[in-house]
Image (spheres, coloured by chain):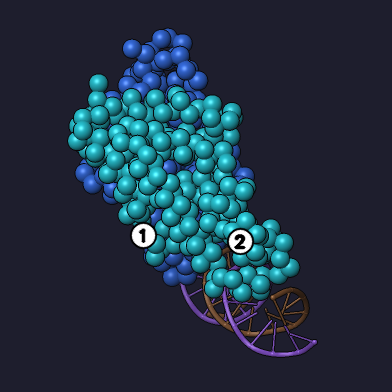
Chain colours: A blue, B cyan, C purple, D brown
Amino acid sequence: MDQEIEILNITPQTTTSSEISIAALKLFATKGYFNTSLTDIAKMANIKNTSEIYQHFTNKQVIAAQLYVDIFANLNESIDEIWLKNDKPSEQLRGTVDLLFKLTEDAPDVMRFLLNMKFNEFLPDEKPLQETPAFCKIYKIIQAGITNGEIRNIDPMMAYIQFFGIVNTTIQGILAGVLDKKADTYLLQTWLAAWNGIVKK
Amino acid sequence: MDQEIEILNITPQTTTSSEISIAALKLFATKGYFNTSLTDIAKMANIKNTSEIYQHFTNKQVIAAQLYVDIFANLNESIDEIWLKNDKPSEQLRGTVDLLFKLTEDAPDVMRFLLNMKFNEFLPDEKPLQETPAFCKIYKIIQAGITNGEIRNIDPMMAYIQFFGIVNTTIQGILAGVLDKKADTYLLQTWLAAWNGIVKK
DNA sequence: GTCTATATTTTGATAGAC
DNA sequence: GTCTATCAAAATATAGAC
């Protein structure tokens, strides 16, 4: 939960605004955007009525939009760090998987938000996923892996899909409780399965 | 589109009721359940006003519930056929992938409905995915594959996730247009990637 | 700056005439 | 059995008192 606050770039001191964001994140991630009313958000944020929400956000959509922007900005930063700390695409992808599993444990609602929500249904004006800097960076890492010979010479988008098809679906299983152990339990075998699928042998 | 009608077990003669189902399927699959109003459905089904919908369905949720039941029943039947026609789990899984890719081409809205919608958000009373007969059958096929030595000895749920993580994510890419060629183009490499990930070598 | 009250809008749903 | 009219409910959003 503290981790969730950090990811939203919110100062530790819990302002009303940040409490609204945290409450909305949790509700959106678990019940979905359309099943979450402003009344729900106010209740969970310990606010008496919905009016006060409008002191901080112009409307419901803006709450979701800010979450979307903040979470993807944070993800983008983390991937930048991983990119700087590691030279080889294989190491960069491994770092990314580590990050996603860490988030799954420390900030599950952030991961639910990332993996389970269909953004275009309630944020029609935001860029599609594959135009976000975070995605583009990952895509470039895969292209670099193909170029340097670590990854098989296939369509980079197919490599992306096969790799993150495994990683993301596993995380979704953990978040849904279908896989019932701690995220960390599945990290190594998930990495191996995903990486072995695209590595050049 | 004709295929979509067949999958919903609707007689070729287009009754008003079936036109409503088809329209709802297309709208739900593309815009989402909550972004689809009865007015939208009436319009797409060439009905003057929403009142007429209530001659055929008790409410909006029931339209979605019937689609859910029909589509999963049809899927279950198809998997039964595949199961009967093939002896080895490897062949049965291959048959299932063939089926899903064929559906992607012939009935894309059915596949969007299956893979993109979060049923528990609007059908809280339906069984979760992993309790549907269709899923259980696939799961048993994977268990049989582990028993007969075709599939590596791993947690069957992990095998399921790794296999269909690749298959479903690829199909979602095709449906979203991120992979822009005909579904058939990606069938073989997707099968190989998914199968090689779980096969015992 | 917090709360009451209310406006507005949408949409799901019904009643009843023809 | 199709269409008009309308209801009811819920949820978003605003105005303004204190």
Residue under label 2, please give it. B18
For badge 2, the amino acid type reads Ser
Q: Position of residue A195 (x, y in %)?
A: 34, 23
Secondary structure at badge 2 equals helix
- What number is the disc on residue B149? none
Question: Could one spot residue A78 in this view of the protein?
Answer: no
Q: Position of residue B78 (x, y in %)?
A: 43, 46
Disc nearer the start of the sequence (1/2): 2
Q: Is residue A90 left or right of residue B111?
A: left
Q: Position of residue A163 (x, y in %)?
A: 39, 28
Observer-nearest residue: B120 or B24? B24
Q: Is residue A178 left or right of residue A138?
A: left
Observer-nearest residue: B112 or A80? B112
For badge 1, the amino acid type reads Lys
Tell me which residue sits at (53%, 56%) in the image.
B9
Secondary structure at badge 1 equals loop
Residue under label 1, please give it. B127
Q: Is residue A147 left or right of residue B90?
A: right
Question: Could one spot residue B126 in this view of the protein?
Answer: yes
The image quadrant where one finds the C terminus of chain B is top left
Q: Is residue A50 left or right of residue A10?
A: right
Q: Chain of mark 2?
A: B
Tell me which residue sits at (36%, 17%) in the image.
A199
The answer to the question of whether label 1 and label 2 lie on touching residues, with beta carbons closer than 8 A, is no
| Up/down of B143 relative to B31, above or below | above
Q: Chain of mark 1?
A: B
Tell me which residue sits at (33%, 19%) in the image.
A91
Q: CA distance from mark 1 to mark 2?
A: 24 Å
Q: Quadrant of residue B144?
A: top left
